[in-house]
Image (cartoon, rainbow, N blue to C red):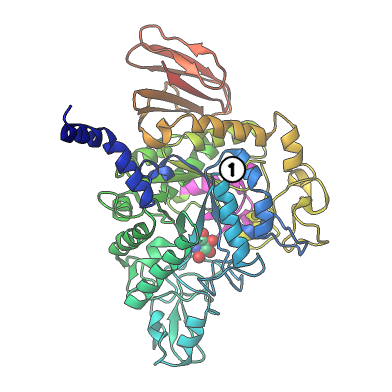
C-alpha cells in the first residue's frame, strides 16, 4: 500500500478514537451527556443528615462520613438543599450570600472535600439554586433599602403605594398575609412572592441576570453537576406583581441553560415548576433547549389521589398528558420532598378524598392545598402499600428522586411548624439522638416517640435485617438500574383488565419491559394482550409467565407489583 493511502486508512480507522479523545480533552463526554435521564437522585439537607463535631447540627464532614451509605443505596446523584449562609428563616431558602457556605455546616474547604469524595464514589452533586429572591439580610437588599439611588435599588421590586392585589398569589396562604411589604427605611413597598423576609429579585434588570449567571458559573467551577432551580415560574414572571396570570419570560430559561452548558457541557437543570401540562413545552423548550428536567408535580398529585382512593383514571390521564416532551428532556418523579404535598391541581372533591385518607386532621394539612406528612405515616406504615408506592416511583417514565429517610420508612413530627415536620434528623442508630449527633440536644428534635421513633426505625437495625425497607429499597434501585428502558425508552400505558391495575410497557434498543401495579388492597387478576406471544420474565421472582396466543393472565396480590422483561 502506498504511503499516502496508508495514512488515509489510518486516519479513517482512528477517526472515532480521535473524536472521543477530543471530546474528553474538551471535558465533554458526549455519551454521558444524558446521565440525568437515567439516574436516581437522593435529596438531603446537610444540617439534618449527620453531625461530625458534636454541635448538634449536621455538617459537610458528617455527610462525607455517610457517602458510602448513600453509594451503597445505588443512587447516582445527591441533591443538597440550600447550604449557603442564611438566617435560616426558611430553612436556607433565604440566602444571604450566594458565593459562600453556611459556617454552621462547615467551611468552603469542607464543601470542596465533599464534592471530591462524592465524585470518588461516582456520585454527582446537585444543589438548590434559589435565585427568585434573597434573604432580607442579604447585603444587596440591605444596600437597596438605604436609598432610592442605591446601586442595588433596582435589583428588587418597589411600589410607592400598596398595590390593589397585595394579597393575591401568595405561596403560603394561611401563614403569609400579603406579597407586598412596607419598607420602613425607604417608605416604599417591596414585592415578595414568598415570606416577607424573601424580597424578590428583579430579573427585568440585566445586572440581576448577569449576577445569576455568575452564581451558576461559580458553583459549576466548584464541581457541581447541576441545579435544582427553585421557584421557576416566579423567577420568569415579568413584571413581578403577584398577578394571577402574569406574563412569563421563558427565554430566561433558555439563556441560563445555554450559559450553564457553556461552562459545563453535561450540566443538568432540574426545575421546580408546578405547571399545567400545556405549559411544559415552554419550560423544556420546543426542542429541549430549556431546562433539561422538571419535577412532574402534575403526575405526583394525581398519583396521591390514586394511592388514596385506588381510582386510577386521573393518574393515567396525567401520565398521558405529560408524555410528549422533547427527546433530551426528562421528568423527575418523586413521592415526597421537603415541602408539603401540593394537591392544588386536584379538584376540591379529589383533594378532600386525599385529605380524608392521608391527612384527616387539620394539623396535617398546610397552605389550603397540601399535606405535611412523610410517606410512611400517610400510608399508615403499611409495608405493602409503601412498596407499591416505591415500586411505582422507580418504574415511572423518568428519573426518580427520593428523600433521605424514606428508604427506612421514617416518620414526621407534626409538632414542628409548617414543613419542618418532614425535615427531622436522619435516624442512624438506636443510640441517643438516633446517632445523628453526640450532642445532648440536636438543633432540631429527632423523632423519639411512637412507631416512627429512632429506636424502632434506624439504619443500623435495617442493615442487619434482610427483609427491611432499606434492603428492599436497595434491591429495587438495583433492579431499576438494570432497566434503562425506563429512563431512555418509549412507553405506553396499556389496558390491564382491572380498573385497579396500572400497566406500563417500555421499549428501548430492542429490549422491552412490562410493569404492573395493583392499587387495590384486594388481589386483582390482570389480563391483557401483547403482540408476538412473548414469554414474560419476572424480574423479581425469577419465574416466567407464558401466554397462550398473546393473551396474558396475571394475578397480583393486594397492593402487588410485578416487573417483567419481555423475551
Ligand atoms: C420552594 C422550596 O421548595 C420551598 O421549600 C421554599 O420555601 C420556597 N421555594 C421558597 O424558596
Counting from the top left corner in percent of width and height, residue 80 is at 56, 56
Q: Is residue 335 left or right of residue 533?
A: right
Q: Is residue 17 left or right of residue 429?
A: left
As rendered, which of 14 and 547 lies closer to the eye? 14
As rendered, which of 166 and 529 lies closer to the eye? 529
Counting from the top left corner in percent of width and height, residue 5 is at 16, 32
Q: Residue 366, located in which quarter of the rendered image?
A: bottom right
Q: Is residue 373 magenta?
A: yes
Can the viewer see residue 424 in this picture? no
| Residue under label 1 | 357
> Residue at coordinates 74% horizontally, 31% vertically from top-left?
465
Q: Is residue 142 magenta?
A: no
Counting from the top left corner in percent of width and height, residue 27 is at 39, 51
Q: Residue 387, located in which quarter of the rendered image?
A: top right
Question: Neighbour class for label 1 at 10 Å: few (<14), some, many (≥20)?
Answer: some
Can the viewer see residue 154 in this picture? yes
> Residue at coordinates 38% horizontally, 36% vertically from top-left?
488
As rendered, which of 499 and 131 lies closer to the eye? 131
Q: Which residues are magenta?
A: 349-377
Query: Against 118, is 101 above or below?
Result: below
Q: Residue furthest top?
A: 548
Amino acid at each position: 500500500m502506498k504511503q499516502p493511502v496508508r495514512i488515509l486508512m489510518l486516519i479513517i480507522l482512528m477517526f472515532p478514537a480521535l473524536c472521543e479523545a477530543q471530546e474528553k480533552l474538551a471535558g465533554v463526554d458526549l455519551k454521558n451527556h444524558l446521565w440525568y435521564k437515567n439516574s436516581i437522585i437522593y435529596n438531603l439537607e446537610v444540617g439534618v443528615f449527620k453531625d461530625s463535631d458534636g454541635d448538634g447540627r449536621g455538617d459537610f464532614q458528617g455527610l462525607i462520613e455517610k457517602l458510602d451509605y448513600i453509594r451503597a443505596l445505588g443512587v447516582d446523584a445527591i441533591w443538597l438543599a440550600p447550604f449557603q449562609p442564611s438566617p435560616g428563616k426558611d430553612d436556607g431558602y433565604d440566602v444571604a450570600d450566594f458565593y459562600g457556605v453556611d459556617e454552621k455546616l462547615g467551611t468552603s474547604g469542607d464543601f470542596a472535600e465533599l464534592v471530591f469524595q462524592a465524585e470518588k464514589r461516582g456520585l454527582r452533586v446537585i444543589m438548590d439554586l434559589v435565585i427568585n429572591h434573597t434573604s432580607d439580610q442579604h447585603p444587596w437588599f440591605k444596600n437597596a433599602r438605604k436609598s432610592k439611588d442605591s446601586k442595588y435599588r433596582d435589583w428588587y421590586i418597589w411600589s410607592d403605594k400598596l398595590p390593589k392585589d397585595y394579597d393575591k398569589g401568595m405561596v403560603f396562604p394561611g401563614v403569609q398575609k400579603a406579597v407586598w411589604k412596607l419598607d420602613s427605611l425607604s417608605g416604599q413597598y417591596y414585592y415578595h412572592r414568598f415570606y416577607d423576609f424573601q424580597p424578590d429579585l428583579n430579573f427585568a434588570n440585566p445586572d440581576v441576570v448577569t449576577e445569576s449567571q455568575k452564581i451558576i458559573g461559580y458553583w459549576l467551577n466548584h464541581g457541581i453537576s447541576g441545579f435544582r432551580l427553585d421557584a421557576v415560574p416566579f423567577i420568569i414572571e415579568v413584571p413581578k406583581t403577584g398577578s394571577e396570570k402574569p406574563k412569563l419570560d421563558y427565554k430566561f430559561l433558555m439563556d441560563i441553560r445555554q450559559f450553564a452548558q457553556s461552562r459545563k457541557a453535561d450540566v443538568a437543570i432540574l426545575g421546580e415548576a408546578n405547571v399545567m401540562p400545556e405549559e411544559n413545552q415552554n419550560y423544556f423548550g420546543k426542542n429541549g433547549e430549556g431546562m433539561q428536567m422538571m419535577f412532574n408535580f402534575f403526575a405526583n398529585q394525581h398519583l396521591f389521589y390514586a394511592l388514596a382512593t385506588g381510582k386510577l383514571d386521573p393518574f393515567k390521564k396525567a401520565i398521558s398528558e405529560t408524555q410528549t416532551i422533547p427527546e433530551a428532556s426528562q421528568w423527575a418523579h418523586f413521592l415526597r420532598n421537603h415541602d408539603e404535598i401540593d394537591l392544588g391541581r386536584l379538584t376540591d372533591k379529589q383533594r378532600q378524598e386525599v385529605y380524608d385518607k392521608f391527612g384527616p386532621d387539620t394539623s396535617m394539612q398546610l397552605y389550603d392545598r397540601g399535606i405535611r406528612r412523610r410517606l410512611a405515616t400517610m400510608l399508615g406504615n403499611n409495608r405493602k402499600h409503601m412498596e407499591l408506592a416505591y415500586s411505582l416511583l422507580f418504574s415511572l417514565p423518568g428519573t426518580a428522586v427520593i428523600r433521605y429517610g424514606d428508604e427506612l420508612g421514617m416518620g414526621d413530627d407534626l409538632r414542628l411548624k409548617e414543613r419542618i415536620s418532614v425535615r427531622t434528623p436522619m435516624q442512624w442508630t438506636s443510640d441517643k439522638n438516633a446517632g445523628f449527633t453526640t450532642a445532648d440536644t440536636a438543633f432540631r428534635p429527632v423523632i423519639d416517640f411512637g412507631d416512627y421513633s429512632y429506636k424502632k426505625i434506624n439504619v443500623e437495625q435495617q442493615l442487619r435485617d434482610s427483609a427491611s425497607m432499606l434492603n428492599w429499597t436497595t434491591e429495587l434501585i438495583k433492579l431499576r438500574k438494570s432497566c434503562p428502558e425506563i429512563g431512555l425508552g418509549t412507553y405506553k400505558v396499556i389496558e390491564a383488565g382491572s380498573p385497579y391495575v396500572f400497566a406500563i410497557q417500555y421499549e428501548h434498543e430492542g429490549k422491552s419491559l412490562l410493569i404492573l401495579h395493583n392499587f387495590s388492597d384486594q388481589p386483582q387478576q390482570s389480563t391483557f394482550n401483547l403482540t408476538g406471544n412473548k414469554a414474560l420474565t419476572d424480574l423479581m421472582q425469577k419465574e416466567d409467565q407464558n401466554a397462550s396466543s398473546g393473551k396474558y393472565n396475571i394475578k397480583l396480590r393486594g397492593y402487588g407489583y410485578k416487573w417483567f422483561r419481555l423475551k
